[in-house]
Image (cartoon, rainbow, N blue to C red):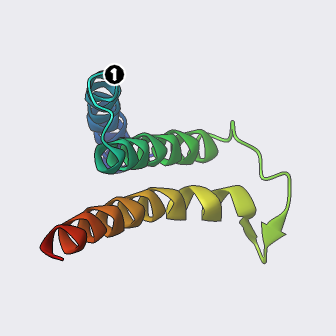
Amino acid sequence: MDKGQLAYMSSRLVLGAAAAFFAIVLWSKTRDAVWMLVITGVIAGYAETVYLVLEALGIAGRAGPAVGSVPFLSILLAGLPAAFFLAAFVTAAARRYRKRL
């Protein structure tokens, strides 16, 4: 692993950990569905980052089902944050649309 990869992984881990920490702090203060979905998306994004780092270090195995040569867990973790953000935006848009009627 070269210095560039180390800097990239370190920045993702540090900033992701900070974002996940503050998301968890906010989670205890809010009960709004939109914010809960955004917070869950941030935490899922950090889980993906941790998994990618573990995979790069050779700690996370490639066992289990795969789609072609890509493990299913990698595909799931890559799409999960976007799915939660999409659900949050749809929920927020639905609220605004209902208020206009």
Quadrant assignment, res 54: top right
Q: Nearer the viewer, residue 82 or 46?
A: 82
Q: Residue at x 43, y 41 (%)?
A: 46
Furthest-left residue in this view: 100
Q: Is residue 2 visible?
A: no
Give the percent coordinates (x, y) of residue 39. 35, 41
Q: Position of residue 28 (x, y in %)?
A: 33, 21
Amino acid type at image mark 1: Ser
Q: Tell me the element at label 1.
A: loop
In the displayed structure, does residue 30 sit left or right of residue 13?
Answer: left
Residue drawn at the location 34% of the way across and 32% of the way down: 20
Percent coordinates x, y for residue 75 in the rendering: 62, 65
Q: Quadrant of residue 3?
A: top left
Q: What residue is at 84 percent from the left and 51 percent from the top?
A: 63
Looking at the image, the residue that sits furthest to the right is 64
Quarter the C terminus occupies? bottom left
